[in-house]
């Protein structure tokens, strides 16, 4: 079941694992050394990945006493279609997303998209696991919305937004990921915020790298 340190990650109706930072109504901009230390501890990433993570913008907004909206954004120098392909390959997500142990499409009673995800990670020498089931709505090529229908949070929903940009001959995508989370009383809010913000950043870095790796393997036309 979902635990304080995991949240769902998104694709067609999907779950996503996220982590958050302790702040309210502000944009998080930790110093580079602190950010580097956090990321290396979390994902054991390369220097390039750490540098990329520093460019990911994370913002936390207090909606209510125990409800938060967390957003993250990154620029990826690839067309929208490439990012969409990676996000909606739901069952392949555990291959590259940190702490995501399982991502499985489920049968939807109304023929929609339903995704089960299980996250696993360590915190303070303890193992945590999390399970969430999300219903998703795809609005190609701009947006993927999701809502939890089963899981350990009182509420969990959000969206992926893809916005194309161009700089001269370079075409890319502004990728934004926003979640609204309402933890159960057994989950400490501070820990949830801290873990979710870190997970958002790590997930966007992983998606950026996945998109670039796949693009590099495609034949040049």
Image (cartoon, rainbow, N blue to C red):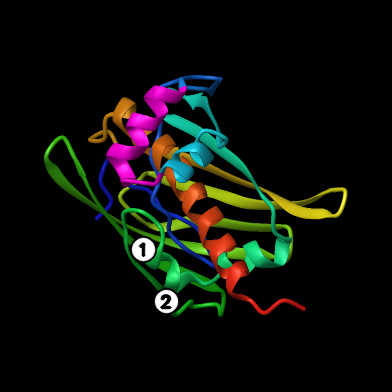
Mark 1 vs mark 2: in front: 1
From the viewer's perspective, tell me whether residue 99 is left or right of residue 158.
left
Q: Which residues are magenta?
A: 32-46
Which residue bears the numbered disc 1? 117
Q: Is residue 122 above or below residue 186?
A: below
Residue 66 visible, this orientation: no
Q: Nearer the viewer, residue 86 or 63?
A: 86
The picture places residue 109, in percent across and down from the top left corner, at: 49, 78
Q: Can residue 97 be seen?
A: yes
Residue identified by numbered label 2: 106
Locate residue 125: give its quadrant. Answer: top left
Picture coordinates of residue 127 (x, y %)? 15, 48
The residue nearer to you, when weighing 62 against 216, is 216
Disc 2 element: strand
Q: Main secondary structure of the magenta part?
A: helix
Please tell me whether residue 12 is drawn above or below residue 198 in the rendered image.
below
Residue at screen point 46% across, 24% down: 32
Q: Quadrant of the N terminus?
A: bottom left
Left or right of 207? Residue 78 is: right
Tell me the residue at 46%/45% (across/down): 49
């Amino acid at each position: 079941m979902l635990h304080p340190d995991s949240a769902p990650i998104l694709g067609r109706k999907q779950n996503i694992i996220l982590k958050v930072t302790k702040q309210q109504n502000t944009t998080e901009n930790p110093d580079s050394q602190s950010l580097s230390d956090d990321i290396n501890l979390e994902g054991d990433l390369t220097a390039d990945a750490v540098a990329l993570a520093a460019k990911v913008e994370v913002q936390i907004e207090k909606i209510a006493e125990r409800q938060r909206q967390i957003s993250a954004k990154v620029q990826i120098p690839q067309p929208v279609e490439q990012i969409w392909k990676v996000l909606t390959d739901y069952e392949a997500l555990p291959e590259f997303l940190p702490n995501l142990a399982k991502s499985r499409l489920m049968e939807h009673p109304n023929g929609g998209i339903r995704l089960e995800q299980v996250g696993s990670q360590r915190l303070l020498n303890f193992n945590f696991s999390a399970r969430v089931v999300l219903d998703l709505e795809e609005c190609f090529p701009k947006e993927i919305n999701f809502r939890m229908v089963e899981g350990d949070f009182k509420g969990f929903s959000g969206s992926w937004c893809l916005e194309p940009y161009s700089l001269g001959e370079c075409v890319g995508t502004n990728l934004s990921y926003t979640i609204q989370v309402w933890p159960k009383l057994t989950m400490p809010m501070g820990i949830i915020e801290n873990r979710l913000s870190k997970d958002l950043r790590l997930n966007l870095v992983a998606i950026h790298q996945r998109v670039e790796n796949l693009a590099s393997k495609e034949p040049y036309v």
